[in-house]
Structure formats: structure tokens, C-alpha cells
Image (cartoon, helix red, strand yellow):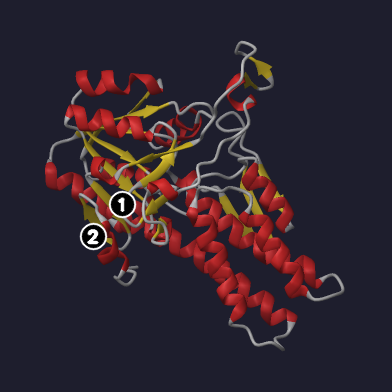
Amino acid sequence: MRERLLAAEKVKAIDWRDGVLYLLDQRKLPLEDDWRGYRTAAQVAEAIRDMVVRGAPAIGIAAAYGVVLGLRERLAREGDWRDGLAADFELLAASRPTAVNLFWALNRMRERLDRLEADVSPAAALGALEAEAVDIHASDREANLTMAQFGMELIRKHSAKPQQVMTHCNTGALATGGFGTALGVIRAAHLAGLLERVYAGETRPWLQGSRLTAWELANEGVPVSLTVDSAAAHLMKTQAISWVIVGADRITANGDVANKIGTYQLAINAMHHGVRFMVVAPSSTIDMNLESGEDIPIEERPAHELLAVNGQRIAADVEACNPVFDVTPADLIDAIVTEKGVVERPDAAKMANLMSRKRLH
């Protein structure tokens, strides 16, 4: 299966070439394939904040490369490059508040920096940080492949027949460093003959489902039907949907999951209709420092994202409430799939046991 998954890798959103970070501008997909080059930490922070790159793993990878760019920029100036780089860390950390992968990647880069000798040469420091960023990128790709296998086997365990599944937002190659998290499992299920159809919610207000997920699946010949977000309960009632499969932006120590707004109501609907609910995310998404989902900061983005499309107002002259994440309690989740293994019916003890394991990849 691993070889088939590798052969199926066709899309990527992040490329590191010749000391420049290239990001596929996901705001313009699927109408325009626009790659942008970034050469400073400030530019990368802006790209993360403005949704050029999105998806928790991809944000973390981009931030790691942003640290490398920040160091290169600091070395070109006079003064203490360590002090200057500290400001770049802070700038990158402030770009998005909810996805813990961002802070996990920055912590890895900071730890690598702290291990350098005090008198390390600038070239050696730059080489060490670049190698760390490249390793973060490569590790995410490997984690994607492992999670795809685990999730596919979990689907097969419950039924060997082709199944209909539902997903939300975009969790594919565009959101990660490789094959995808939830969408990686869906891809693997398709390759294994376990998938009949995917129902993808449009995911308002940025429409990641209709612009990105549907585009990825259609390009690979995976049967997909786009739906409005509010059709989920009706489809669970009228269609033979077996699984809801989603990603995560942060998972707390008790197994609560923060993900794209609308995930919580999908989990409630799934529980009511007897549909299994799977969360797929690398262990870097798990924040053992937070006891429960009540502790997760929830990002609220500007009102215009909800009130206008392409700058054209489509709503009445009112205020808007635009939280972009919600928290799904652990007791609504059937399984959390990571590269370290699968936790069924997650709770604090099971999450602690999972995180005590070494990386499988």
C-alpha cells in the first residue's frame, strides 16, 4: 500500500528550493495555480495570517522555513543575530493562534538553535536550522503515509465493502507536507477499494471544501459530491454514510479536538445517526499542556470574510460573528488516528499512553 500511496502523490503546496520558500496560493485555487516565493520571516508570517498557506501541518512547516529565512536575513545585517531572530520567532508565533502545529514547529526550531554552540559560525547555524526545517517537512510526509495506512485499516476493520464517507474543510496534500491527514485516509481507502463516494462540505466562509478538497479528489478520480454544510444531517439520514473523517488543528490531553468551524455539529449529527467519527492528525497536533478543549484559544477572523465575496458585499448591513474553529468533545469521537497509532474512544489515559510511544516512522 505504501508504494501505491507514494505513486498517488500528485499535489503539493510547499516547496523549498535554493533558499527560497515557495507556497501555492490557496486563495486562488482552483481557478489559478499561483506559486509565490518568500524570502523573509515577515513575509511568511503574512502568508500564514492571510491564508496563502493553511492547514495545521502546512502552517507549521511554513513557519519552520520562515525561521531559516529570518536567520539568513539577520546574518546579512550588523548586530546580534540571535536577538533579531527572537523577534522573528514571536512574529511567526502570532500569525495564527489555534493550530498547535505552528508552535510545535517553532519550538523544534528554537530547541535546535539552543543546542548550537555559543561561538557557532553563521554558516553552520544556518545549515543546522535549514536541516531541521527540512526534517520537519519530511517527517510530516512520512506521518501522512503512516496515518493513511492506519485509518484505512480501521475502515476495513468495520466493513470490507465500499463505503460512503463525509469530510469537512481541506485536509489533503494542500494542508500538509505530503499525502494528507483525513484526506490521506480517504485516498488510501479509495486505493484499497473501500470507498464508494465522498461527501465534501463546502466549508464556509473560505470554501476550502468546494475549492480545495473537491479539486484534489476530482483530479485523482475519487468519486466526490459537494454539499452545502447544512445538508450533513439530511445526508446522514438518507445516505448510507459510514464515517465522518476530519482533521484537527489542536487536540488536548483528554482527547478534545479543535478543528474547522462546523466539525462539532458534524460530530453531534454523527452520534445521533450512528455514523462513526474519525479524527486524523499527526502527534504534533496533540497539546498535552492543555487539559481540555475549554483551554484552546479559538481564532475569530474579520467580519468581511463572512459578509463579502471577492470584495463584493453579499449580506445585510449587520455585524458578523466569525469564529473559524470549534471544539468537539472526546466523547463524540470514535477514533483519533496519528502516526504513533490509533486511539479508539479517546480519554486522558489513552492519550497519555499514545504520547508515551516513540515515533513509528
Q: Position of residue 78 (x, y in %)?
A: 87, 74
* Along the line of sight, the residue nearer the viewer: 26 or 45: 45
- Looking at the picture, tell me which residue is in the foreground, 32 or 303: 303
The residue labelled by disc 2 is: 350
Image check: 47 left or right of 1?
A: right
Amino acid type at circle 1 is Gly
Q: Give the residue type at disc 2.
A: Lys
**Residue 43 horizontal/vertical position (percent):** 72, 51
The answer to whether 242 appears left or right of 361 in the picture is left
Identity of the residue drawn at 19% across and 27% down: 273
Query: For the N terminus, which image quadrant?
Result: bottom left
Of the residues under marks 1 and 2, which one precedes in the sequence? 1
Q: CA distance from mark 1 to mark 2?
A: 9 Å
Residue under circle 1? Answer: 255
User: x and y percent of residue 119 in the render?
Assistant: 72, 89
Label 2, secondary structure: give it: helix
**107 left or right of 199 in image:** right
Q: In this view of the protein, which residue sits in the foreground, 289 or 46?
A: 289
Q: Is residue 329 something one can see in this rendering? A: yes
Q: Is residue 359 above or below residue 25?
A: below
Q: Residue at x 39, y 47 (%)?
A: 293
